[in-house]
Amino acid sequence: MKIYLALTVASLKMYFRNKQALFWALFFPLLIMIIFGLMNFDKYSSPNVGIYDGADNEASRALIQALQGNSEQELLDVEMGTLDEVHHELEFGGSRAVIEIPANYGAPGEFSELKVTYDERFQQERAVVSTILGQVTDAVFKEVAQVPDEYRVENAIGISESFITGQGQGFKAWLIPGVAAMAIMQTGLFTVVFTLVRFKSQGVLRRLKATPIGASHFLAGQLTTKAIVVVLQTYVLVIVGAIVLSVSVGNGRIGAWLDLTILALLGGALFIAIGLAVSGWAKNEETAAPIANIISMPMMFLSGVFFPLSVMPDWLTQWSQYLPLTYLADGMRAITVEGAAITTLGNELIGLGVWIVISFVVATKMFRWE
Amino acid sequence: MTTDIDPVIVARDIHKKYEEITAVNGISFEVHRGEVFGMLGPNGAGKTTTVEILEGMRDADSGDAIINGINVKDDPNAVKAIIGVQLQQNAFFDNLKLSEIVDLYAKLYLATVDPIEVLSRVGLDNRKNSKYAELSGGQKQRLSIAVALVNDPVVLFLDEPTTGLDPQARRQLWELVRKIQKGGATIVLTTHYMEEAEELCDRIAVVENGEIIALDTPDALIDQLLATGFKPEKRIREATLDDVFLNLTGHDLRD
């Protein structure tokens, strides 16, 4: 215990005296976060509409297609989902309106009411969606879609509007947890790779082997240090980000900080394990750096750190949704943006867990002292 | 210190092979308590491998290495706890001050030391706030000896401690070795400087191709050679070039 403490304290001292490591762990992610956050990408986004299709018939599909427009004139950016999903998106700023298509939509002779819900904070978007919806519902039965004649009944569609006050805080709030997740990846991967590979190539590890301590002591000290760094770093990034970009964290839920800490530790463990695997494999810093970059670079751009996966083509997202950083970023975002409890993040926790197991197995197979 | 067992080191028929190459081929010797024992031989003769087996850093293929009554292969960590080791290539954590390095290593042995006192034993107390990377070659070697002394070792292993040092630094290191010997430690020293062996060692083992080909006191070894009718090629002079160099540049350390 005493030995473990001594090693942990020493490696913490070493870490905080390493200006370069501090720069990459704190200042660089903060800089990126603030620059991107101040750019206010929200301004340029076209209205996102979540649609729940309760009818799921030819007529409803024709309506949805009509709302999306065609290649000459794109109208609404439509995201399909279950009733819960589309309302969740609206609530937390993923969309600006929800359209519910009732089950009897398109049934001959029946009156069907489209329920539309808006985020009242976005009146401009509301006007756009409302106008398009009005024109399309008028047109659907006259000219746009190939609808069977018997569906063409005037006044068969009603539109009811309601409003909620969403909690979405826009791109800024969305960006902060993503950058914090990226910083965890960088810390886990790079500081582990660089310190261990340097210690190995310089012979520091060999000198430790001449003392009566076991390898496990040394690794435990290193891991504790990184765990402390990862948690501190997450707090600093989220707090400073929230203050500078004036957003709230976890909907003011105090438990969000505990959840965030747990998730940061899980993410830290995952990327440290990947780092250990790389440093076991690489002989020196020259080979370690490119490998670490090859692992981290794609994730930086494919895991939804700077922009949502939904803007990427489907063939890419069907792979990138399984990346380790995607699970971490999604989980942290659910906690800070939506105020979700960690217990509701089944998908993310399983994804992280599987990756942690894979990485530790590979790391133990790969790691060498000399 | 631990109970007195004499001899303090017993090496018994040690063998070690690396794939095709036989590094150590049946080495046996004993080291008495309090002596400076030299291992001499050309590069690749097997000195370092032998020493590393004694230190518990490498496993022997066969044979026994017993330090102070403990067989290394039975309990390598118990052996590591009572020896001090200076490796041929030493490296210490960067971003730590010398005093912090000494303190950390002492804690690895669960020993409590005054880091400044340990540093002063090797003449580095005035550099206590420096980082390892800022030291000169001689200072680095002296730090690694200081670190090897933190657990007050029964046996101190020095592997080519003066390689790459200038004559001033080398002489200062010799002084240090003598001082440590006077303190009661047994020292095992590998070197390929004959002058160093003659200066410091009570007994010398000459290692060649993984075997000990001669083992005696330096004087006895020289006498044995002379007894064969050997005559040195050069006329023996009263001083060496080393002495000339030191006379010209002075004995003071340059770091």
Image: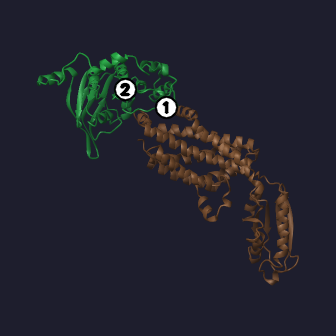
Q: Is residue A149 above or below residue B215?
A: below
Q: Residue at x 67, y 52 (%)?
A: A306
Q: Which residue is mark 2?
A: B165
Q: Nearer the viewer, residue A218 or B158?
A: B158
Is label 2 in a helix, a strand or a loop? loop
| Residue B65 horizontal side relative to residue A44, left or right | left
| Percent x, y of residue A19 | 58, 35
Q: Chain of mark 1?
A: A
Q: Residue B161: which disc?
A: none
Q: Residue at x 73, y 45 (%)?
A: A249
Among the chains, which one is green?
A: B
| Residue A191 horizontal side relative to residue B124, left or right | right
Q: Can residue B6 be seen here?
A: no
- Between the C-alphas of marks 1 and 2, the distance is 34 Å
Q: Which residue is mark 1?
A: A3
> Which three-letter amino acid code belongs to the residue tagged 2?
Leu
> Which three-letter amino acid code belongs to the residue tagged 1?
Ile
Q: Nearer the viewer, residue A3 or B48?
A: B48
Which image quadrant: the C terminus of chain A?
top left
Most distant residue in the bottom direction: A149
Determine which quarter of the picture holds residue A209: top left
| Percent x, y of residue A15 | 56, 35
| Percent x, y of residue A317 | 62, 61
Determine which quarter of the picture holds residue A211: top left
Q: Can residue A132 be seen here?
A: yes
Among the chains, which one is brown?
A: A
Q: Nearer the viewer, residue A26 or A333?
A: A26
| Percent x, y of residue B161 | 35, 27
Q: Chain of mark 2?
A: B
